[in-house]
Image (cartoon, rainbow, N blue to C red):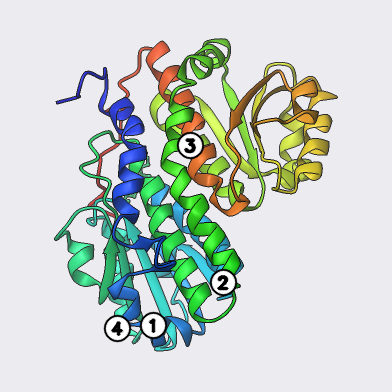
Amino acid sequence: EKGGYDHFMLKEIHEQPKAITDTYRGRMLPIENRIKMSSIEDNLDKFLNANRIIIIACGTSWHAGLVGEYLFEDMARIPVEVEYASEFRYRNPIITNKDVVIAISQSGETADTLAAIKLAKSKGAFVYGVCNVVGSSIARETHSGAYTHAGPEIGVASTKAFTTQITVLTLIALKLGKANGSLAPHTFKNYIQKMQLIPRQVEELLNIDNHVKEIAAVYKDAKNCLYLGRGFNFPVALEGALKLKEISYIHAEGYPAAEMKHGPIALIDENMPIFVIATNKGHYEKVVSNIQEIKSRAGKIIAVVTEGDVQVKEIADHVIEIPDTEEALTPLLTTIPLQLLSYHIAVMLGKNVDQPRNLAKSVTVE
Ligand code: M6R
């Protein structure tokens, strides 16, 4: 049932090209140059007239929500707030019937997310779900929604659910951006064309697994790690750190790269590996100067860069190249090597990758 893979997690990492394709199939129509999602079309007024979109989720799904914030604001110019469901529900939040709430959950059973949905509904908000499990509690409790088509995710560490959640959020952002005129027709078209290439580009990244494994071998005994990214890749840094701590039990923190000098820089010495996402269109020069600051403090740099990169290659200890795409779509690519890296480190340390200690696949108690 693991399809020849040693662990479900590795199988699920490798299923991502198919999972992403399955998630956009029938929704993204390149020939017609449009996105067809009846759940959005039927509620278009609510989305377009919303004061704001509030995204609620937990864990990895919350990280997907953060990517969603960047996507919605950039492509559709709709203000977005992203909330941990557990904080949202207990904060006496201000919600009105002009708000649209998007709840994201792989399992569709997370207790805090479910309770937050009920609260938002009681205040009159329209609640839209993005779930992977058909017929799950959250899928039933929301007014409308779109499923991710990742297939069953068994590994406790979420992988293909994350990239398919981002896929759905990208489709919605593109659709809304086209509908309200925020995205010029040629920009919309370009995104769809680039999106179509993503599954094959993910496949390419899966093929450099050996390179990632070599890097894992170098850093597997680290006690602490930092993950840095900016813009669309700030949430990917958070997700990279979560993946590492969940399955390898190595302490890891994700930060927006520019926040480094506001505290975490104090941690840097020759024993500190720092994973930096430095894609070519993502505030590249700024990230390069962050990398220089780390190097001058003897930190070890493992950089995720765009293929053809020159500058970062000269200063980083290791680089992992991702294929070129639009910056807004890079989280679907930069995530992949970070998943593989965590996986290999955990395996090398002899940890139970699929069922890490203290964790359950779905958190049905608060
Ligand atoms: O099923 P959900 O997406 O609602 O689960 C949310 C979190 O519990 C989940 O993402 C958790 O953080 C994962 N173990 C992360 O890998």
Q: CA distance from mark 4 to mark 1?
A: 21 Å
Q: CA distance from mark 4 to mark 2?
A: 38 Å
| Nearer to me, 181 or 81 | 181
Residue 9 image point, x, y percent: 31, 29
Between disc 3 and disc 2, the foreground one is 2
Q: Earlier in the sequence, mark 3 or mark 1?
A: 1
Q: Amino acid at mark 4?
A: Ser
User: Residue 201 got which mark?
Assistant: 3
Q: Residue at x 47, y 51 (%)?
A: 195
Query: Which residue is under mark 2?
Result: 185
Residue 104 image point, x, y percent: 35, 59
Q: CA distance from mark 1 to mark 2?
A: 19 Å
Q: Earlier in the sequence, mark 3 or mark 2?
A: 2
Residue 257, placed above or below residue 223:
below
Query: Which residue is under mark 4?
Result: 122
Q: Amino acid at mark 1?
A: Leu
Helix, strand or loop for disc 1: helix
Q: Earlier in the sequence, mark 4 or mark 1?
A: 1
Residue 16, placed above or below residue 128:
above
